[in-house]
Image (cartoon, helix red, strand yellow):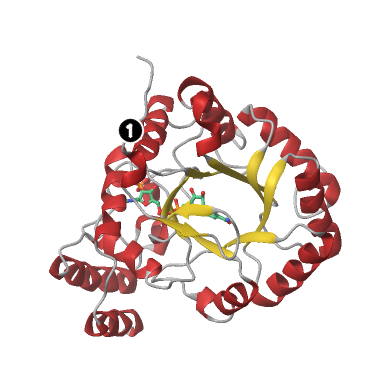
């Protein structure tokens, strides 16, 4: 049956301004790193995208290498766009990235102009689009002049193949330099995409200050630490969870006793707040107003619904924040 999005989809969640730009992003965005490749169910992927859009999620995040196999998440998302969202392109922010290994030889990864622009063309083909909204340099390349990488992003925008430029995983000093170069080229950096969660707080050490000063948005990935910041691993590793799947990036060895001890205590606190741990973990990231959006992954529609409901309770008391700090510090 043909898909018609819900009429009240824009009354359901809030949209935050991305730095000092004209773009608003949903407080929660959907990432297609896992569960959208050819190794997964296309119909499930399609259900998740449709439900997300029905709940007001306008932003879908991809990269050239998402799958597996690499490229298949873009291809499947392209299929969903064509089947269900064809008439809604102007209501969507679609991003992709290049930086990690994509094809053999010296031009298949990192930050050269040669690689980035070829990769973007290939992404557009897989997605079936003329342009993406955001094109990211996926990682800083220590061996390519930053001017070259940034000028490739600028070219992508000038050629109309991307509307905005972004960077991901760049450290604070690298970010400051990249931002300056892009501004000089006349293509301001829209957004930075770093990892951030209760279990990985490196962005607090300088990056968020740079972004705030420069007026750049911040969309954080793995806010649930790939699922560790939910109640799912407290009693063991469930079948079909990311840690149980061979293609999952989360390895069983990462789910250690000290992590589980923290997770169990956080879970108790979340219950007292009337939330699931996943919801509290997302609310905790969004407590910092410099964060534009939390970029979550999902394997089921129900997870997206639960995660969106986190937005109903974003407030923390000083006491709760202190308790969280103490739990996280506990060895
Ligand atoms: N720029 C970069 O370098 C980079 C790197 C990584 C990711 N990203 C982006 O960030 C997105 C999100 O990353 P991520 O998938 O690691 O994020 P995440 O939100 O930390 O983890 C998502 C996983 O957590 C589990 N989950 C989600 N909601 C749940 C809930 N309510 N209850 C129980 N489990 C739940 C699911 O795992 P199960 O499969 O176990 O159900 C889901 O696949 C990616 O899709 C990608 O777009 C970017």
Estimate the x, y position of residue 207 in percent, counting from the top left. Answer: 59, 75
Answer left or right for 169 relative to 259: right
Report if residue 120 is visible in the image. yes
Answer left or right for 43 relative to 91: left
Q: Secondary structure at mark 1?
A: loop
- Most extreme residue toward the top, as rendered? 1
Estimate the x, y position of residue 138 in percent, counting from the top left. Answer: 66, 55
User: Residue, x 38% and y 45% (percent of image)?
Assistant: 298
Mark 1 neighbour density, 10 Å: few (under 14) some (14–19) many (20 or more): few
Whether residue 244 is situated above or below residue 227 in the rendered picture: above
Estimate the x, y position of residue 188 in percent, counting from the top left. Answer: 72, 61
User: Residue, x 69% and y 28% (percent of image)?
Assistant: 125
Whether residue 298 is situated above or below residue 254 in the rendered picture: above
Q: Which residue is mark 1?
A: 7
User: Residue, x 50% and y 38% (percent of image)?
Assistant: 91
User: Residue, x 72% and y 33% (percent of image)?
Assistant: 122
The tally of labels here is 1
Quarter of the image for the C terminus: give it: bottom left
Q: Quadrant of residue 15?
A: bottom left
Of residue 322 and residue 187, the one placed in the foreground of this image is 187
Q: Quadrant of residue 143?
A: bottom right
């Amino acid at each position: 049956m043909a898909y018609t999005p819900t009429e009240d989809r824009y009354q359901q969640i809030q949209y935050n301004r991305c730095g000092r730009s004209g773009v608003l992003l949903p407080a929660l965005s959907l990432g297609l790193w896992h569960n959208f490749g050819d190794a997964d169910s296309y119909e499930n992927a399609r259900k998740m995208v449709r439900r997300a859009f029905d709940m007001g999620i306008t932003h879908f995040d991809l990269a050239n290498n998402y799958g597996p196999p690499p490229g298949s998440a873009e291809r499947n998302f392209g299929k969903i766009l064509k089947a269900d969202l064809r008439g809604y392109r102007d209501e969507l922010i679609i991003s992709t990235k290049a930086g990690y290994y994509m094809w053999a030889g010296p031009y298949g990864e990192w930050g050269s102009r040669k690689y980035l622009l070829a990769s973007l063309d290939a992404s557009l083909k897989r997605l079936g689009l003329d342009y993406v909204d955001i094109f990211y340099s996926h990682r800083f390349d220590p061996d390519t002049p930053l001017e070259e990488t940034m000028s490739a992003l600028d070219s992508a925008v000038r050629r109309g193949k991307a509307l905005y430029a972004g960077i991901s995983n760049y450290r604070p000093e690298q970010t400051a330099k990249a931002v300056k170069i892009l501004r000089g080229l006349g293509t301001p950096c829209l957004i930075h995409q770093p990892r951030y969660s209760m279990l990985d707080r490196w962005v607090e050490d300088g990056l968020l200050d740079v972004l705030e000063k420069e007026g750049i948005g911040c969309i954080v990935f793995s806010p649930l630490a790939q699922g560790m910041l939910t109640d799912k691993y407290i009693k063991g590793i469930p079948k079909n969870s990311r840690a149980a799947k061979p293609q999952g990036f989360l390895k069983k060895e990462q789910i250690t006793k000290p992590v589980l001890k923290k997770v169990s205590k956080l879970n108790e606190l979340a219950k007292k707040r009337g939330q699931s741990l996943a919801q509290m973990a997302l609310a905790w990231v969004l407590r910092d107003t410099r964060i534009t959006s939390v970029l979550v992954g999902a394997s089921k529609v129900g997870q997206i619904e639960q995660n969106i409901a986190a937005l109903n309770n974003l407030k923390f008391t000083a006491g709760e924040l202190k308790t969280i700090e103490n739990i996280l510090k506990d060895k």
